[in-house]
Amino acid sequence: QVQLVESGGGLVQAGGSLRLSCTASGRTFSRFHMAWFRQAPGKEREFVASISKIGAYTYYANSVKGRFTISKDNAKNTVYLQMNSLKPEDTAVYHCAATENSGSSYEHWGQGTQVTVSS
């Protein structure tokens, strides 16, 4: 089992930046592929970005490509999401997720952190 705790959310104006962090405990962090998802009110949860176990591969949703960057620090058991040029449509609860098996569903989820972007 692994426990995930997100932090770094908040209120920011459009065009601003935030960096989200997700710290893991309980299992060897380097065994996990990590991802960020988000869910806006009244909408389904959507994929934002993912990163492979040692950070060699990253993937992004088209809606955030070029604005968001995912990174992973195995020494600190933490995955980050740097979000730049934020837009009001980025407003959502952001969750990190973990899986040991690439290509499978994510088994472990954090509680989420709220990001609100004002226009």
Image (tube, rainbow, N blue to C red):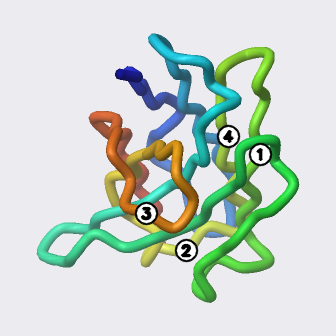
Q: Nearer the viewer, residue 83 or 105?
A: 105
Q: Which residue is mark 3?
A: 104
Circles 1, 4 touching at the beta carbon (< 8 Å) = yes
Q: Which residue is mark 4?
A: 80
The extreme top residue here reads 26
Q: Nearer the observer, disc 3 or disc 4? A: 3
Give the CA distance from mark 4 to mark 2.
19 Å
Q: Is residue 13 above or below residue 81?
A: below
Q: Which residue is mark 1?
A: 71
Q: Mark 3 or mark 2, which is nearer the start of the sequence?
A: 2
How many residues crowd around disc 2 within 10 Å: few (fewer than 14), some, or many (20 or more)? some
**Which residue is depicted at the point 54% across and 31% down?**
22
Q: Mark 1 or mark 3, which is nearer the start of the sequence?
A: 1
Q: Is residue 30 above or below residue 25?
A: below
Q: Nearer the observer, disc 4 or disc 2? A: 4
Q: Which residue is mark 2?
A: 87
Give the CA distance from mark 3 to mark 1.
20 Å
